[in-house]
Image: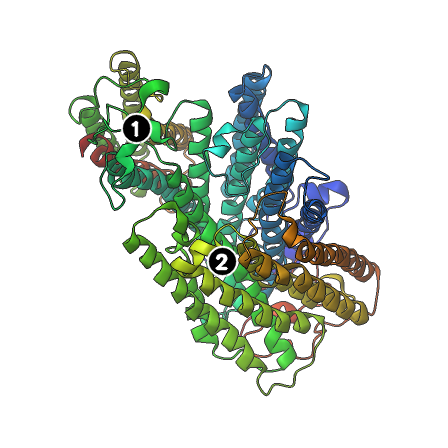
Amino acid sequence: MSTEAVHDEHHDHKPTGWRRWVFSTNHKDIGTMYLIFALVMLFLGGASAMMLRAELWEPGLQIVDPNTYNNLLTNHALIMVFGAVMPAAAGMANWMLPMMIGAPDMALPRLNNLSFWLLPFAALMLIMSFVVPHFGGGVPINTGWTLYPPLSLQAGIGMDFGIFTLHILGISSIMASINIVTTIVNMRAPGMTWFKLPLFAWAWLLTGLLLIVIMPVLAGGVTMLLFDRHFGTSFFDAAGGGDPVLFQHLFWFFGHPEVYVLLLPSIGILGMVVPTFSRKPLFAYKPLVYSMFFLTALGLVVWAHHQYTVGMSKEVTEYFMIGTILISIPVGYMLFSFIFTMWRGSMTFETPMLFAVAIVLMFSFAGVTGVMLAVVPADLQYHDTYFVVAHFHYALIPGALFGIYAGVFYWLPKWTGHMYDERLGKIFFWWTTISFNLTFFVQHFVGLAGMPRRISDYSPVFTDFNQISSIGAFAFGASHLLFLWIIIKTVRGGKKVGDKPWDGAQVGNAGLEWTLPSPPPFHSFSTPPVVK
Amino acid sequence: MTSTTEGYYIPEPSRWPIVGAVTVFTMLVGTALWMNHLSPGPWIMLIGMLMLVLLFKGWFGDVITENLAGSYNGRVDRSFRQGMFWFITSEVFFFITFFGCLYYLRNITLPYLGGEGHLANSHLLWKDFTYSWPPLQLPDASHYTQAKEAMEPGGIPLWNTIILLSSGGTLTWAHWGLKKNSNRQLVLGLVMTIALGLTFFCLQAYEYGHAYTEMDLTLNSGIYGSTFYLLTGFHGFHVTVGSIMLMVILGRAIKRHFSPHNHFAFEAVAWYWHFVDVVWIALYIFVYWL
């Protein structure tokens, strides 16, 4: 044991000051930085959404001009997807995976820090793309996050900054994914076999693999955009023998699996939260893992359902339609698995569980509208309307964001050593859930009635529903101030908790994080635990 | 070689990650300014590239020092191996993107522009356009310079194929030398590999010059020039990076850093080099030949 003592002495002094964070090689510190970054970006992306909803308060142009409106909605999407949800999920992976599987740290700690530190610079680059058009930099990124040519070929220097933002984010995601996959494959404690792995680890393994596959494709696609813009190539110009639809295929080959990148970590969190508060092991754990594999594989081959209206042949659209509808099988399987975990469990409804139940309900709703959108003749009507906006916000806010909230409330006692204020947590849950539904439910109706998306003006007949939507959005935005307050309050103090703040936390395939004190020591497992 | 994570080397706090983030940012800001003809762009790019050199020297220098000090156990070695494997996987998908585009353009876009396909009305756009590969005649050449001729698979490309394939052979021969602890064979094999890589690079540069000046085949020659230069260009970039990596490995081999049982850096570079080889074979078949 003497070697171990030396080892601990060598490692357990914490670096102090700014160096601790900037030069960090510690998975918990890096995870904390990821989570704080995600929270800042959540507010930035939220602020742009608030401006969009303010502009849509009534028909006509009030606050921003159309180009700025479209730039804001592009930034809203890019910030939420790449700045808020993915870093939050990566932050949780950083914090939890090594502790869950009994590893001393991530497999490649320095690479881990580089993956994080690229993000603030990507954010800076995106802010530059937003600012330069106002100083004579030409048209801003007004394409939406999809960056479709030919519009994206005509924008000013802001588009170049936007493209490089995606390059930086791509480098960051690929390196983070390499690290996470390597950690899960290589760093498990003795006895932590594949089918003892917590569901969160499985979810992140598949997310990491997806990112390794899709991020280079996005990078390649936007690089071609860059060459078309500045070096005279004709990838996306039919006059030179290219094809703008080609870019759509490249983008959605990345973009559709990206939805699962956002979703899977949350499914993983549900796989931890639901058994804990049902006090029962996860129902049908192995088939659930298989269905996640199935979802991942299927997710890679159905991308063109985003492009039914571009004139693909009948056979091709039929293939993509059938493939897309098949996705409801693994997703439905996951949701049933969670429902049957709750079935006859001794359930209690703390905040994480409330979010979990809400996800199962509201995400199913997104699944139903998703099947509607997958059907080609129906989609030709719904395409580019607010119905689509409503659908993907029902998929992404419950599917990704609420999953992250569930995770935050579930693990906040572990991270800080303090229990959060349960009463405030419940208020936050009801406030967000009600205001979220208020915002987006009515958008189904305006969409079916034909209101197009990505336009800053609308016909006066849609005014009432848009005002309901805006009221909901402002309430939804404001609820996050409470979220911020709960987190600050919990970090600063509160009821001390033991190793295992949730009494159901060790049922089934739980992680090893509950065997550590709360908050855990700077280095978790210098000696690997043995899993029986 | 332990089977647990016990004694897994966790590096001390390091300055290199943040230097890396600043480097990437500097290079890309410089590039964006340069592409838009804004004056400080090239200088900022240059500063970024110098920082990149220092970054790699510093970061990999630390890793080499730690490795020589014996800090890495078998588990760390496996992390490096798996990391490199997934990195190359992502590179494979980067190239698949461009090959996929080539496939899509040749089999869907261009026939469609020539009036084939399920809608069969696209020839209304450009009535005179008929599709053949390589498309030297463009649908509308007013913004493009049409190439006079296309690349032939014989000549330089064939030589380059032979050169790159033999460089894979010499590298494997160097690896055999390393395994049987013959430093002479290792160094000689590496020198031959680097020489072949540089020859490939020079021939490719000559070919580009020829294409630009004699054949009018440029980035601006429509879709044939676009796909040709991006595919071969990104491959050439990888050959360049691979050659630099090989030179570093050669330097380390001369300093006798490697032993028959501890030479992951060599293997990682060899994997990378073979990957670049395989990409070339695909390039030769799909870009030059078919």
In the drawing, does residue A404 fall left or right of residue B230? right
Q: Tell me the kind of residue under disc 1.
A: Phe
Residue B123 sits in quarter: top left
In the drawing, does residue B162 fall left or right of residue B37? left
Q: Residue at x 32, y 58 (%)?
A: A318
Q: Residue furthest top?
A: B213
| Label 2: element kind | helix
Mark 1 — on which chain does it sit?
Answer: B
Q: Is residue B183 above or below residue A446?
A: above
Q: Is residue B152 above or below residue B272?
A: above
Expressed as whole percent of the image width and height from the top left, the position of residue A347 reads: 66, 83
How many neighbours does mark 1 have within 10 angstroms: few (below 14), some (14-19), or many (20 or more)?
A: many
The number of discs equals 2
Image coloring type: rainbow
| Label 1: element kind | helix
Expressed as whole percent of the image width and height from the top left, the position of residue B24 reads: 56, 32
Q: Which mark is residue B228?
A: 1
Q: Is residue A51 above or below residue A12?
A: above
Expressed as whole percent of the image width and height from the top left, the position of residue B153 reads: 17, 27
Residue A391 showing in the rendered view = yes
Q: Is residue B210 above or below residue A132?
A: above
Q: Residue at x 39, y 58 (%)?
A: A376
Q: Which mark is residue A260?
A: 2
Q: Residue at x 38, y 41 (%)?
A: A245
Q: Tell me the kind of residue under disc 2.
A: Tyr
Viewer-side residue, A287 vs A222? A222
Quadrant for the N terminus of chain A in the image: bottom right
Residue A297 showing in the rendered view = no
Viewer-side residue, B22 vs A489? A489
